[in-house]
Image (cartoon, rainbow, N blue to C red):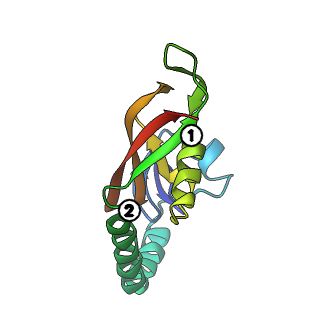
Amino acid sequence: MEIILKEDIKGLGYKNDIIDVKSGYGRNYLIPKGFALIATPSNRKMVEENVKQAAHKADKIRKDAQDIADNIGNTVLEIPAKAGESGRIFGAITTLQVSDALKAKGFDIDRKKISINEEIKSLGDYTAEIDLHKEVKHEVALKVVEG
């Protein structure tokens, strides 16, 4: 079943993308929740027209996302965590803590746009990826310290 996404959905696609999903997923979840439309010819034309009209806005949004990525640059985020004697932390570091550390540095980025590739359960150095725009992704270094 082909659908048109009405908003960005992590792991699936970005707004106005036409994607192919299983019919049950589209019919029972995406469409009733308002995340997608069925890709009929009239809906396709409507989306194409919206994309044309929003092209200059989209370019500005991409440029703003690139500016944020450039400003973050090679910033290393220090995230304090309580740890045992072996260096293993109590709990785990999540995207919420990464988002809070970015806020402390002056970057307001939603935690849903941050992904950590591995579980962080001990002190050390890690990386997280920030999805600022569908064309702009940025990796940020994390340093988990005892705190």
Q: Residue at x 65, y 58 (%)?
A: 34
Q: Please tell me whether mark 2 sits on a helix, a strand or a loop.
A: helix
Left or right, 136 with reference to 24: left
**Residue 132 in the image: x percent, y percent?**
42, 61
Q: Which residue is mark 1?
A: 25
Quadrant of the rendering where the C terminus is positioned:
top right
- Residue 132 disc label: none
Kind of residue at disc 2: Ile
| Crowd tier of the residue under label 2, counting other residues whose Cα lies within 10 Å: few below 14, some 14–19, many 20 or above | some
Residue at the extreme right of the image, as rendered = 32
Q: Is residue 142 above or below residue 87?
A: below
Kind of residue at disc 1: Tyr
Q: Residue at x 37, y 60 (%)?
A: 134
Q: Which residue is mark 2?
A: 72
Q: Quadrant of residue 96?
A: top right
Q: Quadrant of residue 36?
A: bottom right
| Crowd tier of the residue under label 1, counting other residues whose Cα lies within 10 Å: few below 14, some 14–19, many 20 or above | few
**Residue 120 in the image: x percent, y percent?**
48, 28
Q: Please tell me whether mark 1 sits on a helix, a strand or a loop.
A: helix
**Residue 125 in the image: x percent, y percent?**
37, 34
Q: Residue at x 62, y 53 (%)?
A: 31
Q: Earlier in the sequence, mark 1 or mark 2?
A: 1
Residue at the extreme top of the image, as rendered = 86
Residue 46 makes an appearance in the image: yes
Left or right, 73 with reference to 34: left
